[in-house]
Amino acid sequence: MSEMIVDVKHVRRTFFSGSKKTKKEFVALEDISFSVSKGEFVTLLGPSGCGKSTLLKIISDLLPATSGEVSIDASRKDQTPPFGFVFQDSVLLPWRTAIDNALFPFEIMGNRQKTDEAHVRKLFQMAKLVGFENSYPRQLSGGMKQRVSIVRALSYNPPILLMDEPFGALDAITRDNLNNVLLEIWESTRKTVIFVTHSISEALYLSDRIIVMGTKPGRVLKDLAVTLPRPRTEDTKLSPEFYGLVKELRELLK
Amino acid sequence: MGKKILISALSILFLVFFLGFWKGYIIIQNVPAYILPSPETVGQKFWDLLTNGTFFRHGWVTLYTIVIGFSIGSVLGFFAGYFSARNRTFEEIVSPYVMLLQATPKISLIPLFVIWFGLGMPSKLLLIVLSAFFPVMINTILGMRSVSEDYENLMTVLGASERQRVLKMKIPLATPLIMAGLKIAMVQSVIGAIVSEWMSGENGLGYLLVFGSAMYDANLLMASILATTFLGLILYWSIEFLEKKLLFWHESKLAFTEGT
């Protein structure tokens, strides 16, 4: 068993809805526990409303848990965040070029982190963005913007990459492309990735493990190890094993 | 390209027709010149007033009144909007009064200002400041509020300070709406300046207008209307110019390139 980096223990999260008088408690996440090993690619898979995005926000400390805890064993000597976060929308700053967007985290961190432009240029290469360094977001397609957003998340070399339905807004062909780009980046950087999606095939194609979640309340249905061999290619998706797993997950999510 | 030239040609032709209709109407209906002067006499008058310095003397007064009032009003409007957007409670407390004041036609306040501050500069400036204040304030609130939650989340993940959050993300992202507010504010400021010069009139383009009216000098009036139009246009364009410089990254201002 390799080193554990993220440990989620009995996380519960509730929200309140309605006005003061008709206040109703709504359980978004109920007793969620799982852990992630260093370098592992783990996907939170489930239908909308299962709380997978909420869970990712709790892991990244953007939202507090109502009870339970998340421990991150990625203590870095400096004060830099242990996470890179990729959102569904690329949230690039439109007045900055692609490279300036990717270097933006260094500007925010100031003297907490030395600017590593060489590393960012290397990431541009991996993300197949060479030649677009000086383009503005408006000049880039949706897929390219999301690749810049991935480069930005990895620019300061955080040990963990969190991705919240990053390809959800893209067309199927672009999405397949970006899945391959992501796998290449992951294979050469070996970051720990926690990925959120509601696409069964995307989850299977990318992950080492899938945490299958259900709704009402949001909970873990199954922790599934994906044993498909790596490196994965388009052929992986045509294999009988792949189909078997798709079928199993479909049954679970019914 | 050919279509563009055709459109320009038709556009000029439209003006020619308009002037021709104006001239023809005067000849056929025998309209006296003190009611409606002919286009060429208005043009001549405009040229005379421009070359003898009258327009520059009065236009300058109107211009600097607008620039000072607009600047004070929009800076105050920006800060008021900024603090309202940051502080929900503050906004909830002041918003009914802001709505009330915004709905008040500012021009209706002039007679009151005249009683309080007399006919001079303070009354004029106050009116223009108020005219510019509200559109800028309201658009600043809208702009700051329209920043999507994920931008906030990004800054949180990166551990940004409040100052960085505001300066490096919120204000730039709010700029398109703030600029739209400034454009409305400029139009309102020009109206405010002209109307306040009617009241307090001793100089300014607004004064030329009431003077022309009092003298039954339709020629002077129409030439002065033309001059205020040009002043308004120049001021509006200067805001648009600023907008183009600041928002080079926005909307259709860049060509889209294909690729994934």
Image (cartoon, coloured by chain):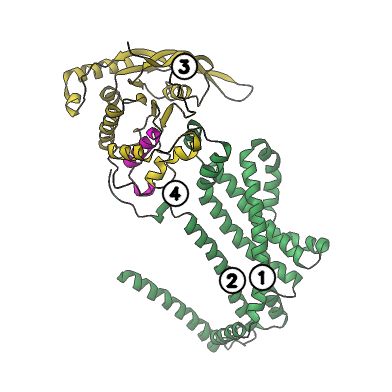
Q: Are marks 1 and 2 in contact (CB under 8 Å)?
A: yes
Between marks 3 and 2, how big is the CA–CA gap?
Answer: 65 Å
- The N terminus of chain B lies in quadrant: bottom left
Chain (green): B
Q: Secondary structure at mark 3?
A: strand
Q: Is residue B110 above or below residue A123?
A: below
Residue B204 locus on image (x, y percent): 69, 74
Q: Colour of chain A?
A: yellow
Foreground residue among A18 and A156: A156
Q: Which residue is mark 3?
A: A71
Q: Are marks 1 and 4 in contact (CB under 8 Å)?
A: no
Q: Residues within 10 Å of mark 1 (few under 14, many from 20)?
A: many
**Labels 3, 4: one chain:** yes
**Where are the magenta residues, as a range?**
A134-155
Q: Is residue A137 visible?
A: yes
Q: Which mark's residue is nearer the viewer, 2 or 4?
A: 4
Foreground residue among B244 and A190: A190
Amino acid type assigned to the residue bearing label 1 in the image: Thr
Amino acid type assigned to the residue bearing label 3 in the image: Ser
Q: Which residue is mark 2?
A: B231
Question: Is residue A189 shown in magenta?
Answer: no
Query: Which image quarter: residue B238?
Result: bottom right
Q: Which mark's residue is nearer the viewer, 3 or 2?
A: 3
Q: Is residue B141 above or below residue B202?
A: above
For the stretch drawn in magenta, the main secondary structure is helix
Between marks 3 and 4, how big is the CA–CA gap?
Answer: 37 Å
Give me the residue at 64% from left, 53% from top. Answer: B75
Please give the label number shown on residue A95: 4
